Image (tube, rainbow, N blue to C red):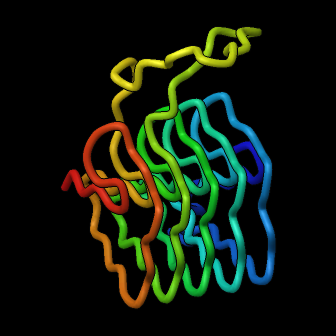
Amino acid sequence: GGGIYSVGASSAIGLRPRLGLSNVTISNNTAIASGGGMVNGGEGQLTLTDSTFSGNKAGDDGAGLNTQDRAGMTVARVTFSGNEANNEGGGVWTASERLTTIRDSAFTQNKAGVPELDEGAVPEPGDVIDPSFNTAGGGGLYSENGPLDVTGSRFSENNSTEEGGGISLDN
């Protein structure tokens, strides 16, 4: 997680770690791996409301937000915009065994499968970067093998180099 990394285990008596975030802006962070804006993993339970994830970048999955392992997540009234992942899930990537719930949120101008440049390389004007170098789905949202419930949300102007510019489900 470039901005926030929240991964925890259950306590000895089975209590799961909880994190609540409201009215926060997580922007312009970079992760070499997953979760440019945030990683939510382990056994954690994330509640995220009235917030913005923008301009984050990830070298792997979930440029805005990455939820994995056995972590649960409830998202309400959150904007994901202008996030870029080299792999799946420009806005959000989820592969949790637990339910991911997204309500009344907006996914705009996120990108998945953004080609990686060699370290230190700067493209010259007119250079053609072959998108087949890096194929990935879910420009706005990518879900892999987990329960997902999305209601009242908007997906617009998201792009991917493979399937699902707005949403890609691999369940």
Q: Nearer the viewer, residue 171 or 14?
A: 171
Extreme residue toward the front, this view: 126
The quarter of the picture where residue 116 lies is top right
Closer to the camera in the image, 1 or 55: 55
Relative image position of residue 156 (x, y in whole percent):
45, 69
Is residue 33 shown left or right of residue 97?
Answer: right
| Residue at 55% over, 71% down | 45
- The residue that appears at 39% across and 18% down in the rendered structure is 133
Residue 24 shows in the view:
yes
Question: Can residue 7 be seen from the camera position used here?
Answer: no
Specify whether 15 is left or right of 18: left
- Residue 137 rendering spot, x and y as whole percentages: 33, 44
Q: Residue 53, percent across and down?
A: 69, 64
Q: Nearer the viewer, residue 163 or 42?
A: 163
Compared to residue 84, the image places residue 122 above or below, namely above
Which residue is painted at 40% across and 90% down in the image? 152
The residue depicted at 40 percent of the width and 71 percent of the height is: 100
Q: Is residue 138 left or right of residue 48?
A: left
* Residue 155 screen position, x and y as percent: 43, 72
The quarter of the rendered structure image containing the N terminus is top right
Depicted 42 relative to depicted 99: above or below: above
The quarter of the rendered structure image containing the C terminus is bottom left
How many labels sit on residues?
A: 0
